[in-house]
Every structure is written in structure tokens, then in C-alpha cells.
Image (cartoon, grey):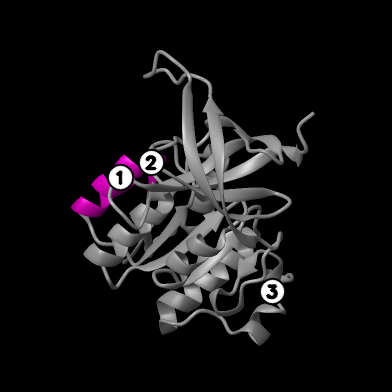
Amino acid sequence: MRKILLVDDENLILYGLCATFRDHDTTVVTASTGAAALAALDRDRFDVCILDLNLPDMCGLDIMKKVRHSSPGTRIIMMSGDEITRPMMEVIEGNAHLLMDKPFDLEVVKKFVDRILMTGKPLLRDESRALKDANDFIKWISSDVRKHERKPVYKSITCFTLPSPNERDPLTLAASVLDISDAGMCIRINHPLAPGRVLTLRDEQTHCTGVVRWCRSGETVATYLSGVQFTSPPIAPV
């Protein structure tokens, strides 16, 4: 009996994946939060974990690393509907089998998972081309092609936020921009930012607005790396 853990906060995706994988030889467990996923991993071991990058309570990268540490035999497939930054891709490369863009073809995903479970290896590129253009959503970790090329940059920027339910006042935070593209930027900051939080970002040359898509611990104590997707393009201030 094979066991698959599905982790996503979108009910339609969980429903579709459950219907695809559930049969007499497969046990499927679902979780819609990071906490629920970790609780499931404490109770059991899984052959495959299909894990969304952005969850309401935790970053999928942190869960991925916990899975790799606690259950090295579990095959991990990451999925995301957002842009993947270079630092994120480096973490995924070291821990997961594949990265899938949303939306994806359930039939092709099933074929990939069946192959991994039967042979321990994902489908080869030439094999996948026959499966409804699988490369449209399968990101081959060894040669990922980014949708928006990010340019490395290092500069200071100020972030302004609206108050969250746990904070009485708006925040004004100093941040460092690490890279930037037409779609967003990666920043280093000394305050955790919850996914979905709206920011106004401004420096002497530009200002823009964006939404936090992911946030994880940085390289040093009390620092965080955060991915911000632009909701308005950067423009020169008046």
C-alpha cells in the first residue's frame, strides 16, 4: 500500500489530486495548512509528498526541509502558481524531485508519480514530451527556465505596511533588495511578513506596491527573506 500526502490550501486542487490518486493500492492524506501537514508527518511516513509553496500559516520550503530531514525516503514534488526566485530554486534543488507550475495536467502528474514510485526515478524528458506537453508545467530542476529573469541588485528600500490583525499600527521597515524583475523582487528584512500582506516599497528612484508571496528565515539570526510580487509596476516618484 503506497501513501501520498497532499498539502495545499486550495480545495479544488486537493479534490482533483485526491480523485486522481485514490485507489485500492493508495492511501491519500490531505492537509490544508503547514501545521496539519507536520502533524500528518509525525503520525506516519509517506512515499510521496506533493506540497504547495505558499500556505496560510507556513512557507512550503520550511515544510519541505522538515520532510527531507525526518523522512529522507519521501519523494517531494513542489507546486506553485507564483514566480520562483533564485534563492528559492536553490533550496528546492537540494530537497525535491520536481517543481510544478499551477495549473497542471492531473493525468501527467499521475504518470510522473507512478513512475517515481515504481522505479525511484522521474520520467525522462523525452518520455514526458509525449504526455500532453508536460514540460509546460514541469520545471526540470537541473535546468529551470524562469518566467521573469531576475537581475541581482543590492540596495536599500523602505517598506510600508497596513496593520495586521495582531498589530495596532502600520509598520515602516528598512529592507535590502537582493534581486528584481518586472514581476517582483526578493528582499531581506528583520521582520517576518505573512504571505498576502500588502506592501508599499519606496526609495529615491522608484516606488511601487506589492503583495508578499513567501517569507522564510534568512542566513543570519533575526533576518528574513521575502518574495514580493508587484501589484503595480515600479515608477519614478513625482
Asked if the stretch drawn in magenta spans residue 36, the answer is: yes
Q: Are marks 1 and 2 in contact (CB under 8 Å)?
A: yes
Specify the amino acid type for callout 1.
Ala
Q: In percent of the image, x 70 and y 63: which residue is there?
A: 149
What secondary structure is the magenta-colored segment mainly? helix
Numbered label attached to residue 6: none
Q: Please tell me which of labels 2 and 3 falls first in the chain.
A: 3
Q: In percent of the image, x 48 and y 51: which residue is there?
A: 52
Front position in the image: 115 or 51: 51
Give the percent coordinates (x, y) of residue 204.
67, 38
- Observer able to see residue 192: yes
Front position in the image: 29 or 234: 234
Give the percent coordinates (x, y) of residue 237.
76, 32
Q: In this view, does 137 lie above or below 202?
A: below
Numbered label attached to residue 222: 1
Q: In percent of the image, x 38 and y 37: which residue is there?
A: 191
Q: How far apart are marks 2 and 3 (CA)?
A: 45 Å
- Nearer mark to the viewer, of 3 and 1: 1
Specify the amino acid type for callout 3.
Leu
Q: How far apart are marks 3 and 1 (CA)?
A: 45 Å
Residue occupied by mark 2: 190
Numbered label attached to residue 131: 3
Q: Which residues make up the magenta segment?
A: 30-43
Q: In which quarter of the image is the N terminus?
A: bottom left
Specify the amino acid type for callout 2.
Asn
